[in-house]
Image (spheres, rainbow, N blue to C red):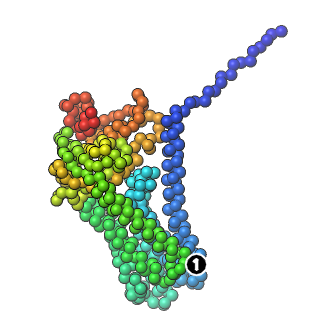
Amino acid sequence: MTLRTAPTVPVRTRRTIDPVDRTRRIRGRRRMRTADAMIALVWASVAAAVTLWLAYGGLNTVSDLGTALTAAGIVTGLVGTDLILVMLVLAARIPAIDRVVGQDTAMAFHRQLGKPALYLILAHGALLTVGSAMADGSNVVTETISLFQGPDMALAYLGLGLLITVVVTSVVAVRRRFSYEVWHLIHLLSYAAVFVALPHQLSAGGVLADGTVQRVYWIALYVLAFGAIAMFRFAVPALRSARHGIRVTGVEQVAPGVVSIHLTGRDLDRLQTTGGQYAIWRFWTSTTWWHAHPISFSAVPTASSARLTVRDLGSGSAAISRVRPGTRVSIEGPYGVFTEAHRVAPKLSVVAAGIGITPIRSMLEHSTLRPGEATVLLRGSDPRRASCGTRSAPSAACAAIRSSR
């Protein structure tokens, strides 16, 4: 009798996942779910605007083509206004939004909504005018004049004109003709455009009748949008700047056209800055006060000091590279998701060139890295700048690295 032994079956061992990697993945999935919830909330607000209009008998007035066009005009106006208010919320630099998706992503979505919102508002005016003209048996010109004389309609037309100005100047081909400061000043008209259109929304046609949930919803949406702008674009930065008392202590040239601006202040560590983040800086001199600069931290702030590294890339950066010690500085931020907290992969690889190394340098400083876990590739425009080991490599990237030593 021959005894046969069963073949050895390899036992599958469960791959061990590093606890740090597991934590990163969990955080990443949580942020993705939160981002999806935010997007869903945006479209839910649009659905709520239309649903409330329908709930209060919005379709009861539709009896012919003219009234159908009027109803369509009301709906496009409600949806367009809702999207504009969402755009204001995205531009308010709300910390919760920044922590999840970052300001760049929020502003990209803000820009994507711009043209559709304008088209809806234009459709709102056109459909209401044509529908009212058909219902009254008049022509479009006569009806436009009649509508203009209605309650608060002059403000509505003013708001439409301001909104068109903002969107047209935001087109890339047009925007290039303006300096950033002029374009930004024009862009601020969007706040006035939304605000001056509010009265006609509350009074014209009784769509948002007093005492209805629909009226409460829209007032709450306006309060949320303008309240967020007032709080996070103006009040919080002003209070934060006054609290920390930031001033320039010195300007150090670290390479041709590259300077490090050393700052001092009170309790700067309470800004809760993470390596890789940036802030909006305003230097209060006669030549720079009107220009806000988005500049990354080149080192994570301590309790009493912070540092920025700036390259002369234009008139604005050239001006701040010449500020004198003692100059008062305002801060808005910090912002950004280019941080260790948003890392999801077990390995880290970064590529940088020139002054772009500054956020990478502060991010690496603030990261917990094991040997071989990170690969950093720096671009040099010539062999002399290919190595940062000596002072003979005066590129902006090397200057930023040397300033960390």
Residue 107 screen position, x and y as percent: 39, 57
Residue located at (54% from left, 71% from top): 50
Question: Is 72 on the left-hand or right-hand side of 87?
Answer: right
Foreground residue among 202 and 134: 202
Q: Vertical placement of 305 versus 213: above or below?
A: above
Q: Residues within 10 Å of mark 1 (few under 14, many from 20)?
A: some
The answer to whether residue 102 is visible is: yes
Which quadrant of the view contains residue 307? top left
Residue located at (32% from left, 66% from top): 188
- The type of residue carrying mark 1 is Tyr
Foreground residue among 287 and 129: 287
Question: Is 265 on the left-hand or right-hand side of 371?
Answer: left
Asked which secondary structure carries label 1, the reply is: loop
Residue to which mark 1 is pinned: 56
Outermost residue, right side? 1
The answer to whether residue 59 is visible is: no
Question: Is 53 on the left-hand or right-hand side of 139?
Answer: right
Outermost residue, bottom side? 137
Residue 267 screen position, x and y as percent: 31, 48
The quadrant the C terminus occupies is top left
The quadrant the N terminus occupies is top right
Residue located at (23% from left, 45% from top): 262
Residue 47 screen position, x and y as percent: 54, 67
Q: Vertical placement of 7 versus 133: above or below?
A: above
Residue 94 screen position, x and y as percent: 41, 58
Q: Vertical placement of 234 versus 308: above or below?
A: below
